[in-house]
Amino acid sequence: MKRSHANLLLLVVAVIWGSAFVAQVVGMTGVEPLTFTGIRFLLGAAIVCPFAWREWRALSAHGAQPLPGDALSVATLGVLLMLGAAFQQIGMTSTTVTNAGFLTALYVPLVPLLAWLILHTRPHWSVWPTSIGCLGGTWLLSGAQALDPVVGDAWVIASSLFWALHVLLVGRIAERMAAPFVVACGQFLVCGLISLLWAGLNETITLAGIRQASLAIAYAGVVSVGIGFTAQVIGQRYAQPADAAIILSAETVFAALFGFLLLGDRLNASGIAGCALILVCIIAVQLAPLTMAGKRSASRSDTAEAGRLPGRRETAG
């Protein structure tokens, strides 16, 4: 898969996740957050399981089935997924949705920073300004209000670290294992089981509540997890983590769009400006490396041509 195709797939993921925001809002009327998270990720695992089983058999037939260490890597991804969602939800019980939306977006600049510190991978220079631009766009989209720090903000900031680590690692693990469906199914199972265990200890789970939220859970499980998160694993095998973080930040734009279309939410001038800034940053981070590569190619061609011209004149003489 080409890098451009992978980035386009990740943009589709952002659209899916943005639409799932509506389902998450509606689903909260029937069940509590950890219950919703656990059921939808287990449903997503069930959707992906046949593909993961087929992929596992194909790997086994070639003697390339995942190793025990790979199971630990996939479990780590599942734990990061669960912690990101859980810490964010805990924080939202004592902070505003505005603060939570803005602080969660800290994962965008955190991804290239962690890639530099942990993996010693230096991203393209354009990643830094576009990451900050996406963060600024999210602030505008969330209302452009001054933050009033509370305890919940610390939980949300912590969740952004887990989201960043997940985005950073998922592509590397999927690429090493060459088994995106196995990776996706495994991390969904771990996330769903731990979330439900936590929910059983801290929330009240009722069949009536699950039935009330069933349509929202089904959409979030099948579309957001089964399709969206699986496509993320596939796309990030071929995309740079920093680019992926910036592209996936468009989720906030599409969440606002679907909120406007389906929930009657309204965007003010700052919100529209925020959407525009995020989209500009996504386009810029795609075009900047291509522009620089084109200039370098043109420069090399000019140099080579200049080196050949004197030789031709001497031969002709």
Image: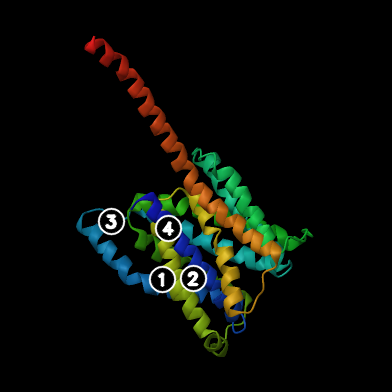
Asked if the residue under mark 1 is in contact with the one under mark 2, i.e. CB atoms within 8 Å, the reply is yes
Q: Residue 251 at x, y = what percent? A: 55, 63
**SS of the residue under disc 1:** helix
Q: Element type at marker 2? A: helix
Q: Which mark identifies residue 8? A: 4
Three-letter amino acid code at the position of disc 3 = Gln
Cα separation, mark 3 vs mark 1, equals: 19 Å
Which tag is nearer the camera, tag 3 or tag 1? Answer: 1
Q: Which amino acid does label 4 sit on?
A: Leu
Q: Which amino acid does label 2 sit on?
A: Gly
- Image coordinates for residue 16, horizontal then vertical, percent: 48, 69
Q: Mark 2 points at which residue?
A: 192
Tell me if mark 4 has few (under 14), some (14-19) or many (20+) residues whose alpha carbon lies within 10 angstroms of its own: some
Query: Which of these two is toward me, 142 or 93?
Result: 142
Instruction: Provide residue 286's location: percent of width, then percent of height.
Output: 48, 48
Residue 149: which disc? none
